[in-house]
Image (tube, rainbow, N blue to C red):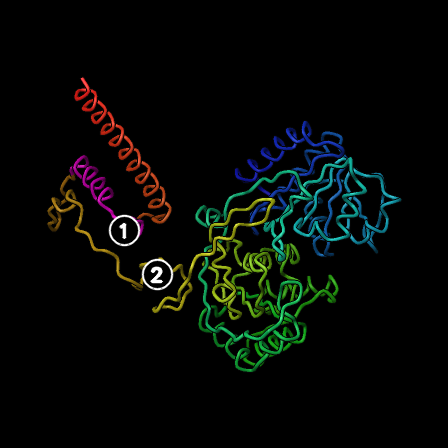
């Protein structure tokens, strides 16, 4: 439950924006959305906000749509010694505690009997447009809503600006990986099923049709083979198209000697916890499912032990960016190694979602998707951005970059066994600046950064290239202004 600096910043920004919204929003209480990537600690953010509000005498409801989200939230609140009750079928209800954890479907039917809280925190808030959430938000006009989501976008492309007044965006997936808060990963796309001719319903593929394509023996065989080749011994979760497909995939792993189990929403909570403990103990290596693990499912919370998912297998093609990001995010919890994404469904390339840590700009109007073009490394088969010169996973050279001579300063250093010679740092700095200025493209700058061993060569090059172009434009403007001055002076002399 340790609060990170970026989480504290998110909470402070949310508080400031709510304070400003209270002066501008009329007719109801303000509503704000907090976006933070999967694995970025939305549960920690929600608990800290809830604790602070209760300490200030406020009543808070936490709204979720799945039973395991209710359980996980209750465990978190218990760890913080928060007094809570439930509004959910089959669970004890006490109207007096300052906190209630609500199942949205149950709350919808009991709205007339429930007193509206001061604040309501909505988990997985990208579901806000659904009728159950809309009814609650319309009934509680004086309640301040705080939404939480990793993906503030919908399959139909519409945003959430009709339901929230402002948004606080957390750090990017790439920043969290580079900072050590999320696990790094390698992605493979070893098989690309032919989905031509498949119909769509509500924007995504018809389940029965894609189930038929993905359940072919060759696809199932590829999953087992590729798991052994790229992720052998890693805890894996596979996302499938239907319960029947998921059961078939689990059976194929078991037949190959890899202990696997299908899980779905019909399994009781104690069965899911027992399965989580089996995976923690190494008795199970693979879980297969349809939607159970997609949103907010925390395997470690279920087992009450540290059980990070180390591999995600995508056996379900989807046009939904939100679903893709939620599924891929399951493997990003740090565990001391590099996670593996096996994209059997072609979601990275064929569906155009790009890589999980591609830069994306989130807003209430939806997501401006910036999926990079990707290629497969000829050395290790990993899926990497098309601009890659050298694969970061295996060192394979994928394309030629313009070769440049070594910096002047570096060429002056004489290397001898047992001797170290002092480097003229000023000369090297000047040589580096000259080399950077002579770069004719962004790719050349990236190549320079990589040769120098920069950890974030792409980001360094992008910033420098932007700065360089701005300086060139400024110089061109100054030169033009100077030319205009001399031309004007010449004309004036002629006129005189």
Q: Position of residue 3 (x, y in %)?
A: 57, 40
- Residue 464 position in % (x across, y down): 32, 41
Crowd band around label 1 with a 10 angstrom C-alpha radius: few (<14), some (14–19), many (20+): some
Label tally: 2
Q: Nearer the viewer, residue 488 or 137?
A: 488
Quarter holding residue 338: bottom left
Predominant SS of the magenta segment: helix
Please say whether residue 193 is visible from this viewpoint: yes
* Extreme residue toward the front, this view: 495
Rendered view: 489 above or below 423 = above
Residue 248 on image: x %, y % = 62, 78
Query: Residue 34 colored magenta?
Result: no
Q: Residue furthest right?
A: 113
Q: Is residue 353 above or below residue 126?
A: below
Give the camera-side residue of 184 and 404.
404
> From which residue to which does the magenta span run?
424-447
Horizontal side of residue 418 vs 233, given as left or right: left
The residue identified by callout 1 is 444
User: Would you name the residue on which mark 2 appears?
Assistant: 391
Decide if residue 308 is in sight here. no
Mark 2, secondary structure of its residue: loop
Rounded to the nearest whole Å, what is the CA distance between mark 2 and mark 1? 16 Å
Indicate the position of residue 303 as horizontal and vertical percent values. 65, 58
């Amino acid at each position: 439950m340790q609060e990170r600096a970026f989480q504290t910043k998110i909470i402070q920004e949310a508080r400031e924006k709510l304070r400003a919204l209270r002066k501008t929003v009329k007719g109801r209480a303000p509503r704000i959305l907090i976006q933070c990537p999967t694995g970025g600690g939305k549960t920690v953010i929600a608990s800290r906000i809830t604790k602070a509000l209760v300490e200030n005498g406020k009543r808070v409801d936490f709204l979720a749509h799945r039973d395991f989200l209710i359980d996980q939230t209750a465990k978190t609140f218990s760890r913080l010694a928060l007094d809570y009750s439930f509004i959910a079928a089959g669970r004890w209800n006490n109207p007096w505690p300052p906190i209630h954890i609500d199942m949205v479907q149950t709350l919808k039917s009991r709205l007339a009997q429930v007193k509206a809280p001061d604040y309501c925190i909505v988990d997985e808030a990208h579901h806000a447009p659904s009728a159950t959430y809309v009814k609650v938000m319309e009934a509680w006009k004086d309640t301040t809503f705080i939404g939480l989501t990793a993906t503030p976008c919908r399959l139909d492309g519409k945003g959430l600006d009709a339901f929230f007044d402002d948004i606080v965006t957390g750090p990017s997936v790439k920043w969290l990986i580079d900072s050590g808060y999320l696990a790094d990963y390698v992605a493979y796309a070893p098989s690309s099923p032919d989905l031509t001719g498949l119909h769509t319903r509500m924007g995504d593929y018809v389940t029965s049709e894609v189930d038929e394509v993905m359940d072919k023996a060759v696809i199932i065989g590829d999953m087992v083979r590729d798991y052994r080749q790229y992720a052998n011994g890693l805890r894996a979760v596979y996302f499938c198209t239907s319960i029947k497909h998921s059961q078939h995939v689990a059976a194929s792993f078991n037949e190959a000697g890899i202990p696997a189990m299908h899980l779905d929403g019909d399994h009781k909570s104690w069965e899911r916890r027992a399965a989580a403990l089996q995976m923690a103990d190494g008795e199970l290596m693979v879980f297969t499912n349809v939607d159970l693990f997609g949103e907010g499912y925390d395997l470690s919370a279920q087992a009450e032990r540290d059980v990070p998912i180390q591999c995600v297998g995508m056996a379900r093609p989807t046009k939904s960016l939100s679903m893709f990001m939620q599924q891929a995010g399951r493997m990003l919890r740090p565990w001391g190694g590099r996670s593996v994404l096996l994209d059997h469904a072609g979601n990275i390339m064929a569906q155009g979602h790009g890589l999980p840590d591609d830069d994306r700009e989130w807003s209430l109007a939806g997501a401006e998707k910036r999926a990079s073009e990707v290629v497969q490394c000829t050395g290790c088969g990993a899926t990497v951005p098309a601009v890659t010169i050298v694969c970061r996973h295996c060192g394979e050279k994928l394309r030629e970059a313009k070769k440049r001579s070594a910096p002047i300063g570096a060429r002056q250093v004489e290397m001898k066994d047992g001797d170290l010679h002092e480097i003229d740092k000023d000369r090297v700095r000047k040589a580096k600046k000259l080399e950077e200025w002579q770069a004719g493209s962004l790719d050349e700058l990236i190549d320079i950064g990589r040769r120098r061993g920069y950890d974030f060569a792409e980001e360094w090059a992008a910033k420098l290239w932007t700065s360089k172009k701005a300086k060139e434009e400024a110089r061109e403007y100054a030169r033009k202004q100077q030319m205009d001055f001399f031309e004007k002076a010449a004309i004036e002399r002629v006129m005189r």
